[in-house]
Amino acid sequence: MDEEGESILLQDNYYQLLNVSKTATQEEISSAYRRFSRIFHPDKHSSDPNKQKWAEQIFNKVKEAYEVLSDSHKRAIYDTLGKRGLEVDGWEIIFRTRTPREIREEYDRLKREREERRLQQSANPRGTITLSINATDMFMKYYDEYDILEDSAIIPTVEVSGMTIQQSIDAPVTLRNTVTLSGNISTQNGTGTGAVTMSNRHLSSERGWTEVECGIGNGPVFGFKLFRTLSRLMFVNCGTGLQFTSRGIVPSFVSTMALQLDAHSVGYLTYRAGGQAGSSMTSTYVRDSEKHHLNAAVQIGNPHSFISFNIMRKMPQHDMKLRLALKFGTFGAIAEYGVEKKVSQNSSVSAAVMLGVPSGVMLKLKWSCSSQTVVVPIHLCEEVIPAPVFYATVVPMLSWLILKKLVLDPIARERRERERQRSMEANFERLQEMQRQARATIELMRETYSRIRSDEEKNKGLVIIRALYGKLPEGATEHEIESEQTGDTGSPDSPLRYLEVIDVTIPVQCLIKDSRLELLEASKSELPGFYDPCVGDDKHLTIKYFFHSNLHCCTVSDTQAVVLPRNNHRIKNRS
């Protein structure tokens, strides 16, 4: 398990320990400290040496949390760096005269420097492999049946018509200079080409950079690029090049000016001249919001002019993007629809169907992993007919569902379980200690629990009948909570049937003040009397309680805030 994952489990959360928010005032922090001091102060448990020992340990943690959060300088360090930041020698001396804002700015500066050093050591490889497949023989035979020869093949011919491999690596030389080496080779219908290019990008200032490149392929190539931020809302990008071929020198020029129109929209104006692509002027409008990405462009030039429009619907809850594109021009017309699905943190797959006149029907498959990409365009038919459109749409969907069900989902479950087991093993001793400490904490809370519950019962206030925390079985969160007990008494000492669920009735009751329970929007495992019984799994907190003599039950996720009683909770009366 990585260091960051360990720190999440092994380090105390001072805010959760005192059950205060990160924006809590000094008065709220002091009030929480006094409240827990009355429960855990060693002098209150002097009659039992064993309880006094545990009380001293817990009280020292509460006191440590209070000392940090009540000191603005220590609190700023803790908010920025965590508990480890307080343990670094020199921080207290260096930052004693600085404000919390200055501490955060200093940390951000150090973070940027570490990021720059990391970039210097990174080659940042990027690569794309494109494999073009010609499968037109699969569908065109339906329209050529009168021309079929007697010796024609029974199985349709599917061939690789072309392949392109592109690769590049970055080599940061200094903080302001980065050398990039890139190359590509391609073959199309038996004819191959290739090129190698080297460039150096110099960060001239915070407002721009310059780049010089040279290469060799179909003759030597030299180029120069310039980027400059003109204002807060505008930038310009220019590039020029010379290619030396057997037919002479071919110059080229590209210039783009961009203007930010609003918080989500940018307009681009691009002019191209010379080179093999011809000359053109393109105007582009791009709008990127939380749920949609829209791109519209108009190009006038030689050899082609066109109008294009594409829209993408983002569905982050499903890790998916839906895309629709239309393009009309002097070359014909193209319509495209597709979907992109995120498979893991750094990889995704996509499939798109392109319907074009006169290009026909094409299925484009794409797989991306980090900075490496594999693209497989499959030309299915030279005409737009129903059969290839149907198969190009349905086959990738069915293939994905089968692959996900039989391969990807089992691998993901196995990986999650393996990570969970590794986490449990790496922190076994710590978990055992947390369990013992939680039980000892509950023993220290019993007297306070009895007093608070008795007061709430007299006032017909908030009385906790049962509170469970952990990996609750499906369907047991509300209706089977009673079966978690061996009897119907509702005693918090009743044993549980599930090992990954702990009883937190006593700690929850002790957190009630004036018939009101407030738990923060954070993991409940750091609260006094709680611990994490199932590291790495989704956890819930279920509370069954009386309020004004009515029985209610609510269930929340581990990091969801809790405020009881509350009308907009999911409450069910069962009086």
Image (cartoon, helix red, strand yellow):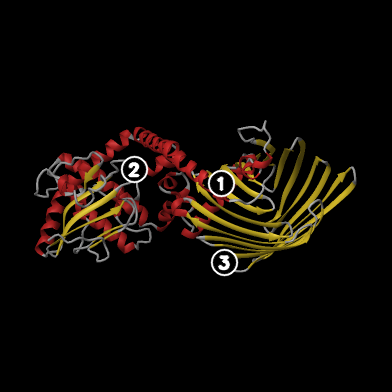
Q: Position of residue 35 (x, y in %)?
A: 23, 57
Q: At 76% from the left edge and 36% from the top edge, which residue is drawn?
A: 192
- Residue 401 as seen in the image, left or right of residue 64: right
The residue type indicated by label 2 comes to Asp
Q: At 11% from the left edge and 65% from the top edge, which residue is drawn?
A: 459
Q: Quadrant of residue 88?
A: top left
- Crowding at mark 1 (Cα within 10 Å: few <14, some 14-19, many 20+): many
Q: Position of residue 174 (x, y in %)?
A: 69, 44
The residue type indicated by label 3 comes to Ala
Q: Residue furthest bottom?
A: 261
Q: Quadrant of the C terminus?
A: bottom left
Disc number lying in front (3 or 1): 1
Judging by the rendered image, the residue that carries numbered circle 2 is 537
* Separation (CA) of disc 2 from disc 1: 39 Å
Label disc, if present, on residue 263 of the rendered structure: 3
**Do callouts 3 and 1 mark residues in contact (Cβ within 8 Å)?**
no
Q: Position of residue 55 (x, y in %)?
A: 21, 45
- Crowding at mark 3 (Cα within 10 Å: few <14, some 14-19, many 20+): few
Q: Quadrant of residue 189?
A: top right
Q: At 19% from the left edge and 48% from the top edge, which residue is drawn?
A: 480
